[in-house]
Amino acid sequence: MSPHLAVFVGLGLFVKNLIVATDNNPNDPVLAELGNLKRDLKTLAEKIGQQFDDLKAFQVSLKFFENFTSTTSVLYRAMTDVTESNNREASERVFKRLYNKNHPFDLTRTMMQMIGNDETNPLKIGMKADPLETKRTFSNG
């Protein structure tokens, strides 16, 4: 058994023994504190879930940025270098190499696949992460 699992098993046995020892007396302060602990653990689980959704939205947005925004920015800079550079032939070679490596058709196809999937679409993930902000953004009132 893993040490992490053993901790939860031990905690469960401890709580079980406390409940058995108190004979289900509703006025027992230990049971009242256990009720408070249960409420606090539920609140903590909700907060962890929200933070996890925020982290997931950040990761999807970062991957989208890495795959498309930075790549197209580099292509754009290489293209402008061709028109502004004194050494046009070298700039053209660099641009052609980057263009062939990151062809716009391939970028567009990959982007459409990402946007078409709910799990890789940064807009949909962001909207799931913060439903209140989504409602406020898209409501007419």
Image (cartoon, rainbow, N blue to C red):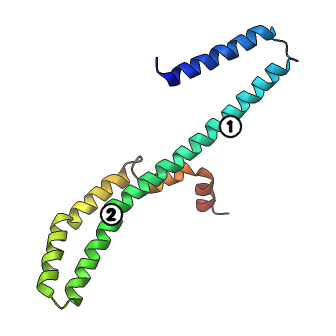
Distance CA(mark 1)–CA(mark 2): 38 Å
Q: Secondary structure at mark 2?
A: helix
Above or below for 5 versus 86: above
Quarter holding the C terminus is bottom right
User: Percent from the top left, x then y, of residue 118?
Assistant: 41, 47
Question: For the residue carrying disc 1, how many other residues have a C-alpha within 10 Å: few (<14), some (14-19), or many (20+)?
Answer: few
Q: Quadrant of residue 99?
A: bottom left
Mark number, residue 56: none
Indicate the amino acid at tag 2: Phe
Please state if 64 lies on the left or on the right of 56 as rendered.
left
| Of 121 and 3, the residue lying toward us | 3
For the point 68% across and 13% down, the residue is 16
Task: Inspect the image, locate mark 1, and give the three-letter code of the amino acid beneath it.
Answer: Thr
Instruction: Return the residue found at the far right.
Output: 27
Nearest-to-viewer mark from 1 and 2? 1
Q: Residue furthest bottom?
A: 86
Q: Which residue in the structure is indicated by mark 1?
A: 43
Quick check: marks 1 and 2 in contact, CB under 8 Å?
Answer: no
98 w.r.t. 52: above or below: below
Q: Residue at x 13, y 82 (%)?
A: 90
Front in this rendered view, residue 123 or 23: 23
- x, y percentage for residue 4? 52, 25
Residue drawn at (67%, 33%) of the image: 42
Q: Is 43 on the left-hand or right-hand side of 88?
A: right
Residue 34 position within the rendered picture, expressed as x and y whole percent measured from the top left: 75, 23
The answer to which quarter of the image holds residue 62 is bottom left
Looking at this view, name the residue that lies furthest to the front.
3
Disc 2 target residue: 68
Question: Where residue 39 sits: x, y (%)?
Answer: 73, 31
Badge 1 element: helix
Write the residue at 43% across / 52% down: 59
Q: Earlier in the sequence, mark 1 or mark 2?
A: 1
